[in-house]
Amino acid sequence: MMDKQNLLLLPGLLDDAALWEHQCKYLAELAEITVADLTPYDSMAKMAQSVLENAPACFALAGLSMGGYVAHEIMRRALDRVTKLALIDTSAQPENEEQTQHRKELIQLTLIGKFKEVTPRLLSLLVHPNRVQDQKLTNTIIAMAERVGQDAFLRHNKAIMARRDSREDLRRIKCPTLILVGRQDTLTPIKVHEEMAAGIAHARLIIIEDCGHLSCLEQPQAVTALLRDWLLYR
């Protein structure tokens, strides 16, 4: 029987372990899985350091959205400890002015006591247009955001706005790398994933059809199957 690998999963903004529920359930036979708790930290450096301090010596690493930004920081710090890398609905680019302005509007909403309005406003950006009325899916997303809470939301936005440009570091990545993106992801569109794939030697880029930004929740079977193949790759 094949020895289990160590797999670390990194959630996105306003996400917790529920983001990875399907993957944790159906990849458990292949890997010892840990979903990192990033909520206490307000910088990519602190998040990456926390993950590394609590991680085994070597591990496979997957991150979605903000989790992908943290994964880039981990690769800068501990390239030799990561056996495999999966970057999901994320980017190697720094924040641009338009993104920062939108983020500041949501921060202001939070500061005036309207945090509960943040996630409903984001839903159309987080999921495929056909899923916005899917109550099971949207209730899961809203419940995650409530558990993460407004303080962590503010900390994470600070971290995201200050994140480094990771594009120059892509060429250093040599481990098997899987890059996944939903076809209808408007927050981190296909072109930024093509950029990452072009920068990483032997990276595999896969576009998930009928899917927005939160692919692990929207198309869990597809993401889990692709991560299974990635874990089994030798």
Image (spheres, grey):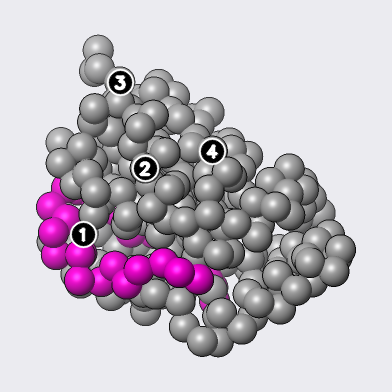
N-terminal of the pair, mark 2 or mark 1, is: 2
Whichever of labels 3 and 1 marks the residue nearer the N terminus, that label is 3
Front tag of 1 and 4: 4
Mark closer to the observer (3, 2):
2
Mark 4 to mark 3 CA distance (whole Å): 22 Å
Q: Which residue is mark 1?
A: 203
Please give left or right for residue 128 compared with residue 54 in the image: right
In the figure, 88 relative to 94: above or below? above
Split into 4 quadrants, where in the image is the N terminus?
top left
Q: Which residues are magenta?
A: 161-186
The amino acid type of the residue labelled 1 equals Ala
Residue type marked 2: Gln
Q: Secondary structure at mark 3?
A: loop
Determine contact: label 2, label 4, CB under 8 Å. no
Mark 4: amino acid: Asp
Amino acid at circle 3: Lys
Q: CA distance from mark 1 to mark 4?
A: 27 Å
Q: Position of residue 176 (x, y in %)?
A: 19, 48
User: Which residue does the numbered mark 2 point to in the structure image?
Assistant: 49
Nearer to us: label 4 or label 3: 4
Secondary structure at badge 1 equals: loop
Query: In this view of the protein, which residue sits in the foreground, 127 or 170?
Result: 170
Q: Is residue 178 magenta?
A: yes
Give x and y (percent) for residue 20.
Answer: 54, 40
Q: Residue at x 30, y 37 (%)?
A: 60
- Give the mark, 2 or 4, whose residue is nearer the N terminus: 4
